[in-house]
């Protein structure tokens, strides 16, 4: 590791200082956690795609709708879940609609809002993909960690999650 420049050593300037060994250890732990989770997520989604031919964004959209009330949600909620722009979400929804897996229609609560809803084939595809992911999670995560460690990890991450993801239905 490179030496910390003299003018940025702790105490020389209250705001600019080098990380302490404890800071570096913490940052390295974070790097292991976040990069490991990213790689693991990619592997899990590859498992789903290999079995179902659903691209990760398509699976995430179907999963969101599978768990939404009445298997439907506003397109803006779908965009927020995917982390895509409106245009990007529309492209995913278009592909899923062309495949017959979802349909779009105006919300009965607010006709300015477009809802995405799973079709019967979309529901079947979402269930198959979800079960594939559950099997992959058991194999790649729960098996090596153990059920109790996995549950503790989930609880810990849930405790610090800044956006716990509550879903709202139509009032």
Image: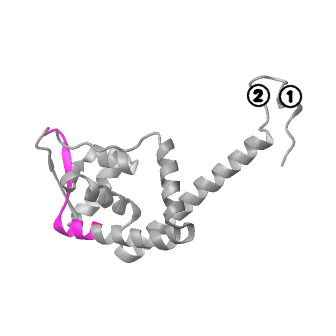
Residue 133 found in image quarter: bottom left
Q: Does the magenta stretch include residue 60?
A: no
**Residue 49 - label:** none
CB-based contact (under 8 Å), mark 2 and mark 1: yes
**Residue 16 - label:** 2
Label 1, secondary structure: give it: helix
Q: How crowded is mark 1: few (under 14 residues within 10 Å), some or many (20 or more)?
A: few
**Residue 7 - label:** 1
Rendered position, 112 above or below 127? above
Mark 2 or mark 1: which comes first in sequence?
1
Residue 35 found in image quarter: bottom right
Q: Which residue is drawn at 30% across and 72% down?
A: 128
Image location (x, y in percent) of residue 111:
12, 40
Label 2, secondary structure: give it: loop
Left or right, residue 5 beside residue 78: right
Q: What stretch is highlighted in magenta?
A: 110-126
Q: Residue at x 29, y 52 (%)?
A: 90
For the C terminus, the quadrant is top left
Total marks in image: 2
**Colour scheme of the picture:** one colour
Q: Residue at x 46, y 71 (%)?
A: 138
The residue lying furthest to the left in this view is 108
Image location (x, y in percent) of residue 156:
52, 49
In this orientation, which residue lies closer to the viewer: 134 or 77? Answer: 134
Image location (x, y in percent) of residue 73:
23, 49
Image location (x, y in percent) of residue 95:
28, 62
The residue lying furthest to the bottom in this view is 51
Q: How crowded is mark 2: few (under 14 residues within 10 Å), some or many (20 or more)?
A: few
């Amino acid at each position: 590791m490179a030496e910390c420049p003299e003018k940025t050593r702790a105490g020389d300037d209250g705001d600019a200082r080098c990380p302490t060994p404890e800071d570096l250890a913490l940052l390295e732990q974070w790097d292991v956690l976040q990069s490991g989770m990213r790689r693991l997520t990619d592997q899990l989604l590859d498992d789903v795609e290999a079995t179902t031919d659903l691209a990760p964004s398509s699976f995430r959209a179907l999963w969101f709708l599978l768990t939404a009330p009445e298997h439907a949600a506003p397109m803006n909620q779908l965009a927020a879940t995917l982390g895509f722009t409106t245009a990007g979400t529309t492209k995913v929804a278009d592909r899923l609609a062309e495949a017959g897996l979802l349909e779009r229609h105006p919300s009965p609560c607010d006709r300015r809002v477009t809802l995405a809803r799973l079709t019967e084939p979309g529901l079947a595809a979402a269930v198959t993909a979800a079960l594939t992911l559950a099997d992959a999670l058991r194999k790649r995560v729960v098996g090596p960690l153990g059920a109790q460690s996995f549950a503790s990890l989930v609880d810990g991450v849930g405790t610090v999650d800044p956006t716990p993801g509550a879903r709202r239905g139509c009032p």
